[in-house]
Amino acid sequence: MDEFGMDGLDRLRHYWELNQKLILGMLGVVLAAAIIGFFTWRARIEASSSAAGRLAEASVQFWQGNYQGSLGIAQQVAGQHGGTPAGVDAWRLIGDNQYWLGQFKDAAASYRKFLDRRKRGVLADAVRRSLAYALESDRQFDEAARIYLDLATRLDRESAADCLLGAARCLRAAGRAAEAANLYRRVASDFGETGSARMARIYLAETSVTRLR
């Protein structure tokens, strides 16, 4: 090996002797961070998998009509795994169970917790619709009507007609009969082939008969 090569090796050896503790320490920190990161990632995957399994169990209970049992499991998932996708979705199922148990105010609160965490998308709009149903059942007609009207601007035709009918129903219950009648007419004329339009025409016929008496 030539003199230049020997000088390079000597400088490298000298550098190592001076800095080996620092280099080894830095390598140890990097390795520790990698190990911690791996186990954290694996723990999250396991937690997410466990939460999804429990939520699936709660869903089965719901569709079997065991709303109280489903509610208990879904509440555990939301409480123990709130940071996972299943933990977020649990609030939707909690609201569904509370709705069918007649706990309309609690159902509305649970739907809002879901929407606080997931604001956009098809599922979010489905939960907003459930929120409107819960508010209507809790006799919060003005707020329910507002949500129905907002949803009607972006849902498919059949669903939009149903939401407009829901808004009309709420306005009528809130004593805003003229606004309700306008919505019924809109549904009857713009959505003539839907079941909602047939219901709107029935209401308009009933009110016409009432006025003639």
Image (cartoon, grey):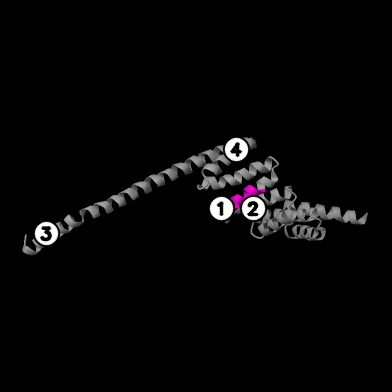
Q: CA distance from mark 3 to mark 4?
A: 71 Å
Q: Is residue 187 above or below residue 51?
A: below
Q: Is residue 163 above or below residue 4?
A: above
Q: Which mark is residue 128?
A: 2
Left or right of 72 on screen, residue 1: left
Most common secondary structure along the magenta stretch: helix
Report, in whole angstroms, how far the alpha carbon at label 1 lies from the one at label 4.
21 Å
User: Looking at the image, which is closer to me, 16 or 171?
Assistant: 16
For mark 3, give the secondary structure: helix
Q: To which residue does mark 4 refer?
A: 72
- Residue 119: say if magenta: no
The disc, 2 or 1, on the residue closer to the chain's N-terminal end is 1
For label 4, the SS is helix
Q: Is residue 64 visible?
A: no
Residue at mark 1 to residue at mark 3: CA–CA distance: 60 Å
The residue that label 1 is drawn on is 117
Image quadrant of residue 79? top right
Q: Are marks 3 and 2 in contact (CB under 8 Å)?
A: no
Kind of residue indicated by mark 2:
Arg
- N-terminal of the pair, mark 1 or mark 4, is 4
* 3 or 4: mark nearer the eye: 3
User: Residue drawn 68% across and 40% down?
Assistant: 101
Q: Amino acid at mark 1?
A: Arg
Q: Report the magenta residues as a range.
A: 108-117
The mark lying in front, picked from 3 and 2, is 3
- Residue 86: percent from left, percent from top: 53, 45
Disc 3 from disc 2: Cα separation: 72 Å
Q: CA distance from mark 2 to mark 1?
A: 13 Å
Neighbour tally class for label 1: few under 14, some 14-19, many 20 plus, Cα within 10 Å: some
Amino acid tagged 4: Gly
